[in-house]
Amino acid sequence: MAQLESIVLDLPQAEVVYFPNFYDLETANSIFNRLKTETPWQQDKITVFGKTYDQPRLTALYGNNGKSYTYSNITMQPHPFSALLKKIKTKTEETTKTSFTTCLLNLYRFGKDSNGWHADNEKELGTNPIIASLSFGAPRAFHFKNKENKHLKHKMILENGSLLLMKGTTQHHWLHQIPKTAKPIGPRINLTFRTIR
Ligand SMILES: O=C(O)CCC(=O)C(=O)O
Ligand SMILES: [Fe+2]
């Protein structure tokens, strides 16, 4: 079998590896279609500076230890892993040599859906969390910004079928976001596998 292409990002104080073709296109498209229709998508409310908004994307949480996940004042209860997600989880674990307990799914319905600047640094993820982020559907821009030096930035496109692995001290020193875009683009599904203690 051909070796999986991997690209190590040249970011200081971070460990980020991108696998553009983690899934071939046919498999990626089929996973996208199944996840889009089979997932119990929810839209939570978020409160920012005392004002309440609909979160600008749909989400679902899956986990194998029943542990809830809290971020941005939202606490999500996990569904048990579906057969499809278990299969994706196993493949991701083999490549990353990491075992995950939990998967957060995001559905960006259109270009106006987004995920604002944040680090995945919740306490229950432990120090130096390993986060495996899979992308299906429309390619979207993904931005990194250093917390200490705002001039240090990196922009990339997360392609259909790709895997982005963030580990080491990445979440201590860097923020990331999926910015809104005015371009007419189709939906995208993102899966982030995490370990919740
Ligand atoms: O959609 C993405 O690629 C990023 C998702 C993300 O950063 C998160 O859910 O924490
Ligand atoms: Fe994140």
Image (cartoon, grey):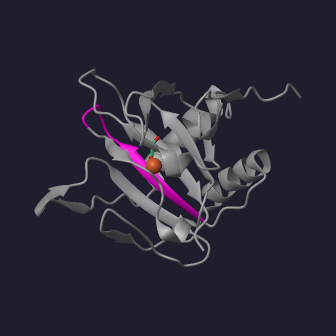
For the residue pair 98 and 191, the one nearer the viewer reads as 98
Residue ranking furthest to the bottom: 66
Identify the residue at image location x=39%, y=27%.
151
Image quadrant for the C terminus? bottom right
Residue range in magenta is: 102-112
Q: Is residue 18 magenta?
A: no
Q: Which residue is at 59% across, 55% downward?
A: 193
Q: Between 103 and 29, which is closer to the camera in this rendering?
A: 103
Q: Position of residue 192 (x, y in %)?
A: 54, 51
Q: Is residue 145 left or right of residue 49?
A: right
Tell which of 151 and 8 is nearer to you.
151
Residue at the limit of the structure toward the right, as seen here:
1
Horizontal and vertical percent position of residue 16:
62, 38
- On the rendered structure, is 151 left or right of 87? left
- Residue located at (66% from left, 62% from top): 100
Can the viewer see residue 191? Answer: no
Residue 105 magenta-drawn? yes
User: Residue 104 placed where, x, y %?
Assistant: 48, 57
Quadrant hosting residue 46: bottom left
Q: Is residue 192 above or below residue 3?
A: below
**Residue at far front of view:** 148
Tell me which secondary structure the magenta stretch mostly adopts: strand
Instruction: Check the picture and name the quadrant holding the N terminus.
Output: top right
**Whether residue 157 can be seen here:** yes
Q: Picture coordinates of residue 153 (x, y %)?
A: 44, 28
Location of residue 133 (image quadrant): top right
Q: Is residue 5 above or below residue 61?
A: above
**Number of marks present in the image shown:** 0
Question: Relative to 20, is 96 on the left or the right?
Answer: right
The outermost residue toward the left is 51
